[in-house]
């Protein structure tokens, strides 16, 4: 395959700590190890469709390692195959992939570096089918991309959530309350499970296991009977009760994925107060988890991902996503990642740790955890 001499990069989906570190690594590797020109498309695939871009060199990425967000901007609405266009008073979704490819070709690009999560990888898989050379870089605080053991951005979000739980702990103890902390993660419970373990959560509710509110109430009562007059509940935004559904905060009409989650913690608080007669308070961390400087782990991981992505493009190793597997940088076909979600499983070490240390996962004591996961998977 033709080796790259000029590449484009874009950052798609929600922002997260480490995006700028990847951009920096790509540009620095392109100039240090090769003579490859780099241009950055603005606002994700939207920039490629509308031909909005900027040239990037060493001076443009100086000082970016510790900076959150993305200097290129991003969009979680810019799917080239379902691009929102306002016609009259309503949005319609059009296929603008051909326009994106024309812009790509007119700029004389050899490859596109697509940095993003599941939506970006799904769009990239479609562009690969249309003949575009793509190298994917996995990004999401949700840690729900298949093919890689971890995504950059996750460790930073986990650290922020854990610090928040630590702070809420003191208030919970002082006021003898049940404190419910809601975290992002969409349909995967990695942030809730990880921060709950690290922050000393007593109850952790994740999307992968529909919760029994009675089991949650029983855990609080048991703690109170042992003289522990407060409880910490960590809940993922995609959690739902047995027989119930997710809580949708709002719908965005001009987005290919219109659902915005949020608010399950308020529902849990109202239900719990009726069962335990203890005041419950809610804290929703929301976008706090996506902002700010990346952790040391994410700075290193993002740099390694960016470096390897550029090496892949330089040698013509296209249509694959960089990945971390068992501590080593590797790559997987983008088509194997697109449209799939990496969820928490019953046999994961963190799940078993939570169970063995007495953390309530929203399941009645007599119910087997593996059965709960299996039942959830069939609904």
Image (spheres, rainbow, N blue to C red):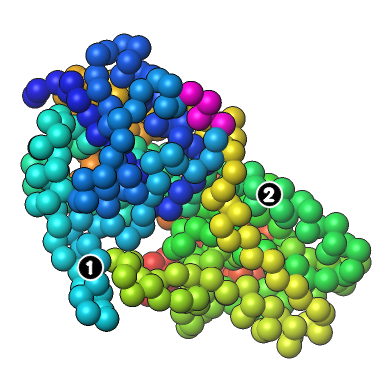
Which quadrant would the C terminus be assigned to in this image?
bottom left
With 262 as the anchor, is 114 left or right in this view? left
Element type at mark 2: helix
- Residue placed under numbered mark 1 in the picture: 85
203 vs 199: above or below: below
* Callout count: 2
274 vs 22: above or below: below
- Residue placed under numbered mark 2 in the picture: 162
Q: Which mark is residue 309?
A: none
Q: Main secondary structure of the magenta part?
A: loop
The answer to whether mark 2 and mark 1 are in CB contact below 8 A is: no
Q: Depth check: 31 or 223 in front?
A: 31
Image coords of residue 26 (percent x, y): 35, 26
Q: Depth check: 260 or 78 in front?
A: 78
Residue 226 visible in the current orientation = no
Q: Depth check: 144 or 156 in front?
A: 156
With 258 as the anchor, is 349 left or right in this view? right
Category of crowding for the residue at label 1, using alpha-carbon neighbours closer than 10 angstroms: few (below 14), some (14–19), many (at least 20): few
Residue located at (64% from left, 77% from top): 266
Quarter-of-image position of residue 349: top right
Image coords of residue 272 (percent x, y): 71, 81
């Amino acid at each position: 395959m033709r080796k790259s001499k000029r590449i484009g990069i874009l950052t798609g989906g929600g922002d997260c700590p480490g995006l700028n570190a990847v951009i920096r690594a790509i540009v620095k590797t392109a100039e240090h190890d090769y003579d490859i020109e780099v241009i950055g498309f603005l606002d994700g695939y939207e920039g490629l469709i509308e031909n909005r871009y900027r040239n990037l060199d060493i001076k443009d990425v100086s000082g970016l390692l510790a900076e959150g967000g993305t200097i290129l901007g991003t969009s979680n609405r810019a799917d080239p195959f379902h691009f929102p266009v306002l016609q009259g008073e309503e949005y319609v979704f059009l296929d603008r992939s051909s326009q994106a490819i024309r812009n790509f070709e007119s700029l004389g690009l050899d490859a596109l570096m697509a940095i993003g999560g599941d939506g970006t990888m799904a769009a990239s898989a479609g562009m690969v089918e249309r003949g575009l050379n793509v190298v994917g870089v996995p990004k999401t605080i949700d840690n729900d991309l298949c093919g890689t053991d971890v995504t950059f951005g996750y460790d930073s979000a986990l650290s922020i959530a854990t610090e928040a739980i630590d702070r809420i702990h003191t208030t919970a103890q002082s006021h003898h309350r049940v404190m419910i902390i809601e975290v992002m993660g969409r349909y995967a419970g990695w942030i809730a499970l990880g921060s709950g373990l690290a922050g000393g959560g007593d109850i952790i509710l994740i999307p992968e296991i529909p919760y029994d509110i009675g089991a949650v109430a029983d855990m609080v009562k048991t703690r109170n009977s042992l003289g522990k007059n407060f409880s910490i509940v960590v809940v993922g935004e995609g959690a739902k009760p047995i027989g119930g559904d997710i809580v949708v905060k709002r719908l965005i009409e001009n987005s290919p994925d219109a659902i915005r989650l949020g608010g399950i913690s308020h529902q849990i608080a109202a239900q719990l107060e009726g069962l335990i007669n203890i005041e419950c308070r809610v804290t929703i961390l929301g976008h706090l988890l996506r902002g700010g400087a990346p952790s040391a782990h994410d700075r290193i991981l993002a740099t390694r991902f960016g470096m390897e992505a550029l090496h892949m493009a330089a040698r013509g190793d296209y249509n694959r996503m960089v990945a971390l597997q068992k501590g080593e940088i590797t790559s997987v076909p983008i088509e194997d990642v697109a449209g799939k979600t990496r969820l928490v499983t019953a046999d994961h070490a963190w799940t078993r740790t939570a169970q063995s240390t007495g953390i309530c996962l929203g399941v009645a004591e007599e119910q087997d955890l593996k059965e709960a996961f299996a039942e959830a998977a069939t609904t």
